[in-house]
Image: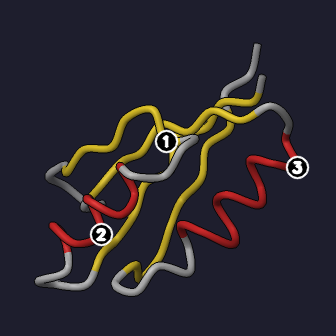
Amino acid sequence: MALSYVLMNVELGAEEKVLKEVRNMPNVKECNRVYGVYDMIAKIEADSMDQLKEIISWKIRRLSGVRSTLTTIVMD
């Protein structure tokens, strides 16, 4: 099992739309808005590192309204 936390910067005014879209993704276990340098954080679980990479690169980072991401991979 691969586990990651993805911090996101989101365009002003797009927060609710992005939050809803990310929360509806099957591998996203949790997503919340936060205060600070980043606007949102998502907890993502996948069966493999390749699947995790695909979810982050091809689904989350390409959402309209997502300006940038910072990905952290949880180590066992």
Q: Residue 54 location in percent, x, y?
A: 77, 61
Check disc 2 and report its element: helix, strand or loop: helix
What residue is pinned by disc 3?
Answer: 50
In the displayed structure, would residue 26 be above or below residue 39?
Answer: above
Check disc 1 and report its element: helix, strand or loop: strand
55 and 36: which one is in front? Answer: 55
Given the image, on which type of amino acid does mark 1 rest? Val
Task: Please identify the quarter of the rendering in which residue 56 is found.
Answer: bottom right
How far apart, in angstroms, are the residues tagged by discs 3 and 1? 15 Å
What residue is pinned by disc 1?
Answer: 28
61 and 68: which one is in front? Answer: 61
Q: Is residue 63 left or right of residue 41?
A: right
Q: Residue 13 location in percent, x, y?
A: 11, 83
In the displayed structure, would residue 60 be above or below residue 50?
Answer: below
Q: Which mark is residue 11?
A: none
Given the image, on which type of amino acid does mark 3 rest? Asp
What residue is pinned by disc 2?
Answer: 18
Given the image, on which type of amino acid does mark 2 rest? Val
Q: Residue 30 location in percent, x, y?
A: 37, 35
Q: Residue 41 location in percent, x, y?
A: 36, 48
How far apart, in angstroms, are the residues tagged by discs 2 and 1? 13 Å
What colouring style does the render use?
secondary structure
